[in-house]
Amino acid sequence: MALVRITSPHAQGQNRTASVMQSVLLATVPGVVVMTHFFGFGTLANILWGGLLALLFEACALKLRKRPLGFYLRDYSALVTSTLLCIALPPYAPWWLIVVGVGIAILLAKHLYGGLGYNPFNPAMVGYVVLLISFPVQMTAWAPPRGAGEVPGLLDAVQALFTPAAYDGVTMATPLDVLKQNNSLLIEDLWAANPQFGRWAGKGWEWVNMAFLAGGAWLLYKRIFTWHAPVAMLASLALMSALFYDGGSSASGGSPLFHLLSGATMFGAFFIVTDPVTSAVSLRGRLIYGALIGVLVYLIRVWGNYPDAIAFAVLIMNFAAPFIDHYTQPRTYGHSKPRDNSQGGES
Amino acid sequence: MAEANYKDLSVNGLWKNNPALVQLLGLCPLLAVTGTVVNAIGLGLATIGVLLTSNVAVSLIRNIVNDAVRLPAFVMIIASAVTCIELLMQAFAYELYQILGIFLPLITTNCVILGRADAYASKNSLAPAAYDGFIMGLGFSVVLVLLGALRELVGTGALFANMDLLFGPAAADWKVVLVDDYQNFLLAILPPGAFIFTGLLIALKNLVDGQIKKHQDARRTKPIKGAKRVRVTGTIS
């Protein structure tokens, strides 16, 4: 009888980088499908074109850095970055906008800092913010949702991507933008006056957000990330909007439900805030990290210059994540008190 | 230093000890006003002028001024030089003077100038000190102009816009549009662009240095294979 000695661990998890990344990609599917339903094929075209570019840029960067190509290309991390960025971009964006965005995200925000796992800032959000600051005209041109305007077809999406000069698109302010520009109408009247508002938030947007919520819930069930950061972010955003919601006057910032289901809230909460590399690490730290992002999102949405704020809030908190980690080190097993590193290493 | 080596001074100022890329001094104007080539040339010329005059003056008074009060004296000299340059610019390039704004008087606090005054001019005679001031200023200005050109090119798709601010009306049509229908890449002109492009320039310089070193190492004669080691201790068996 052959006695094969196998060392522990005997049960192995399947949480390899590639399978985690695949799960995240899979979880974006419901959101992307709903976006395609409401805004047409623009987002899908963005994602395909962006994915192609991401693989290309990733391969170039790996080649320059003399890293094994196949190993790193198969971990799907570049595709996740580009997909998240392309979901955030307005549909029917011109091709060069995506080239610049994905290039900045992969080359500047990821590989210049040392590649996967070393980037202090969320690459997709860095790409998004660079584009938003550099090309405000293209970045704020959102198509009208189904029900508020004509939805372009598949050919329009391809034409908008590759011959942007010839594409004659229709754009409409997003609900967050309309609310931001409003200074005379009561919320009720604003709802009635603008076709892009739906039952709770923006027409289409509420369903897009719910679809991303569903995808995020599935990731939570798969234990890809813990509940702390997204729940803290949504809770603090809801709390902020409840505190400053005055029942719908013209100066109101919008109801909690409106903020939870508008813009990139759910997408940000489950796909951006939960990035394991750039967020805080300890569970207590993640609560603080998420909660502060929620507060910042509300502050920038209501009193800042831009209608939506997920990207800025996340980048600001990425700066703060190491600081939060320093002060929320969990108790070491066997020690009664958490070790205080600021006291010169005395335990 | 008895005998000044002008070749060493040049190599130091322009490459090996470049104020902007190696010493990383004077980053404030470097990052702030290099949005266009004309701004960069304007500030570069002003910096060269100030460095030259301050180095000359410091070198002349180096044996008179007490060591304990040398820094205040140097700063007074630099401030006077800056004021002269500022007035000159106000007279001959008023619009550029307005664009450069606070960064012109701020040349006074540019560390390159005080650094050269204290580290070189106060220890050397007139001619080498003047040459050092000029070449350090040139090294700084070259980087300024390079950065300005990069940022203007990436930011607006054109080069040499508004050169008439500095070179008179004849230079008004020097602007070269390299890409038609260019969507302005605002980030390059905004402050983050300055940081990113400065970092890239420093990386490029380090890359070139690495290549030069590799080349030199390869050219250096290799030790002959099979050469016997000379024993210095123990007995030879």
Image (spheres, rainbow, N blue to C red):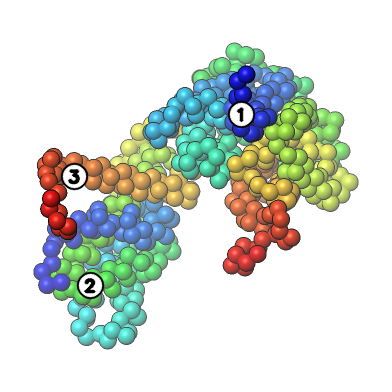
Q: Amino acid at mark 3?
A: Gln
Rounded to the nearest angstrom, the CA distance separating label 1 from label 3 is 53 Å
Evaluate if marks 3 and 2 touch, with contact meaning CB atoms under 8 Å apart: no
Counting from the top left corner in percent of width and height, residue A44 is at 62, 20
- Residue holding disc 2: B121
Asked if one can make out residue A342 in the rendered structure from this viewpoint, the answer is no
Q: Is residue A80 above or below residue B214?
A: above
Between residue A202 and residue A11, name the one nearer to us: A11
Tag nearer the camera, 3 or 2: 3
Tag nearer the camera, 1 or 3: 1
Label of residue B216 in the image: 3
- Residue holding disc 1: A6
| Crowd band around label 3 with a 10 angstrom C-alpha radius: few (<14), some (14–19), many (20+) | few
Evaluate if marks 2 and 1 touch, with contact meaning CB atoms under 8 Å apart: no
Name the residue at the front extreme.
A1
Residue at x 22% of width, y 85% of height:
B64
